[in-house]
């Protein structure tokens, strides 16, 4: 028999498990499986793993540990999350924002010869979900909702410091039985270019519009990540409009605005036409020297030390603290203990202390070994896990964690998010496929 790939299912949602086997091998044969995919910028990502066929001539990725490869644990999804950008010195960020399906091609290699291949298709939504562009007054986004008419809970998804919209995430969540709005607020056509002077009233207008959608049961949930997590908490503390809030790796403070993708001395948020106070950064000479040294040595650069210097005098930043105790909705906090962009675990712990007496059923998810990109809407276990980003000039930034730790956190937190939001929704249609 000729060794061949046995994959089931060949087409699936991005969050579904896939069974990958090799059959038809001679007993104890070494086989290698390579995986290849491309991100939206056409960057190529690859992985590989070598296995030893059992006495029946079968390799089963769900129960076997690779002998060697880009991952080293028993994990049927290992070939997906361990993929790296082939042209980067260390690795690069896998970019995915739109809701188009993804193709991953697997190659089976025996004795250095390719003997079989197969292409897997992963979906974020199918024909049971409808997609619509949203543009009214200054509000812009993309809406996904079930085709079957009903009364569904709704979710607004807020992007982080990259701006734009997370269409793929909104599409996947809509396939679970939600009306989901990927809401833009900067960084794309039709909204401000930079994260500067963004009025909180903009989000309230979008919330009120979504609440009146004929398919929405009145329940509106917020899911924000990084700067979007900061924003979600700020909105919850300002407006009593949300059934629950999921804040992924958030700040506990209002932080500075951004120009051209980097922090700048400008106001991020306004309310009632007034600028909201924000943290003042403290840049030490030793920190800047260390970052410059790492750049010269071509080592990944972490921004964590800037935040540690800034937080040394936390009372000075008290005026910029987000008053999470004013939030009436239950909150799920998600943090990475090895977050190198900012100290999300420290921030969440501070907020947990403030909420000790809250009667709301808040949840706190701490992933000790994970970094900044560890959860929905930015991370999926069946996509390349993000640790590094090439930011130009020979400089690579690290967001922390490892591919394995970030993927494991993405797997666990996705289940937790679905359970949490579902628990605080009152629709029997939750979980529809």
Image (tube, rainbow, N blue to C red):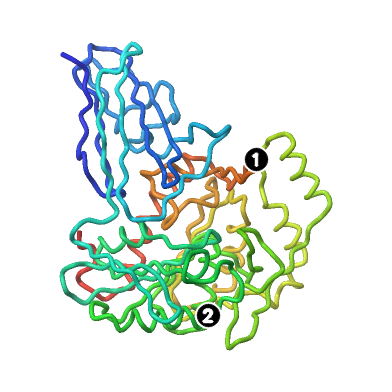
Quarter placement of the N terminus: top left
Q: Which mark is residue 48?
A: none
Q: Is residue 277 left or right of residue 400?
A: right
**How many marks overall?**
2
The image quadrant of residue 417 is bottom left
- C-alpha span from label 1 to label 2: 35 Å
Pick the front one: 376 or 138: 138
Residue at image mark 2: 200
* Residue 27 image point, x, y percent: 24, 12
Pick the front one: 380 or 397: 397
Q: Is residue 158 left or right of residue 76?
A: right
Residue at image mark 1: 300
* Residue 318 image point, x, y percent: 70, 75
Does dot 2 land on a helix, a strand or a loop?
helix
Vertical arrangement, residue 413 with respect to residue 212, above or below: above
Q: Is residue 108 left or right of residue 47?
A: left
Does dot 1 land on a helix, a strand or a loop?
loop
The image quadrant of residue 254 is bottom right
Kindly identify the residue that appears in the image at 70 percent across and 58 percent down.
307
Quarter placement of the C terminus: bottom left
Which residue in the rendered view is the most extreme toward the right? 285
* Residue 38 image point, x, y percent: 39, 40
């Amino acid at each position: 028999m000729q060794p061949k790939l046995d994959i089931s299912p060949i087409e699936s949602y991005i969050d579904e498990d896939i069974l990958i086997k090799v059959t038809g091998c001679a007993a104890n044969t070494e086989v290698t499986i390579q995986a290849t995919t491309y991100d939206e910028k056409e960057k190529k990502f690859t992985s590989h793993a070598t296995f030893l066929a059992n006495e029946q001539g079968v390799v089963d990725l769900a129960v076997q540990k690779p002998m060697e490869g880009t991952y080293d644990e028993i994990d049927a999804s290992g070939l997906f999350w361990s993929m790296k950008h082939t042209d980067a010195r260390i690795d690069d960020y896998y970019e995915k924002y739109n809701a188009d399906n993804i193709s991953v091609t697997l190659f089976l290699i025996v004795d250095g010869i390719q003997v079989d291949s197969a292409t897997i298709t992963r979906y974020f939504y199918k024909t049971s979900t409808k997609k619509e562009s949203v543009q009214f007054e200054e509000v812009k986004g993309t809406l996904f909702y079930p085709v079957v008419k009903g009364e569904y809970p709704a979710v607004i998804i807020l992007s982080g410091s990259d701006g734009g919209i997370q269409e793929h995430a909104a599409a996947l969540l809509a396939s679970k039985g939600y009306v989901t709005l990927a809401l833009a607020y900067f960084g794309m056509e039709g909204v401000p270019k930079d994260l500067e002077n963004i009025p909180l009233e903009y989000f309230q207008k979008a919330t009120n519009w979504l609440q009146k959608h004929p398919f929405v049961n009145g329940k509106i949930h917020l899911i924000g990540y990084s700067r979007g997590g900061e924003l979600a908490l700020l909105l919850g503390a300002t407006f009593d409009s949300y059934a629950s809030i999921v804040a992924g790796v958030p700040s506990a403070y209002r932080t500075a605005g951004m120009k051209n993708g980097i922090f700048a001395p400008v106001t991020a948020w306004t309310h009632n036409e007034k600028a909201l106070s924000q943290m003042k950064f403290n840049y030490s000479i030793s920190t800047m020297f260390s970052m410059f040294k790492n750049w010269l040595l071509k080592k990944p650069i972490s921004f964590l030390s800037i935040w540690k210097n800034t937080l040394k005098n936390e009372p000075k930043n008290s005026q910029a603290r987000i008053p999470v105790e004013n939030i009436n909705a239950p909150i799920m906090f998600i943090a990475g203990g090895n977050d190198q962009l900012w100290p999300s675990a420290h921030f969440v712990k501070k907020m947990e202390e403030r909420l000790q007496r809250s009667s709301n059923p808040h949840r706190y998810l701490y992933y000790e070994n994970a970094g900044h990109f560890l959860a929905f809407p930015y991370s999926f276990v069946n996509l390349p896990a993000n640790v590094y980003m090439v930011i130009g000039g020979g400089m690579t930034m690290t967001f922390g964690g490892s591919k394995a730790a970030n993927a494991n956190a993405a797997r666990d937190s996705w289940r937790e998010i679905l359970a949490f939001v579902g628990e605080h929704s009152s629709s029997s249609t939750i979980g529809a496929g």
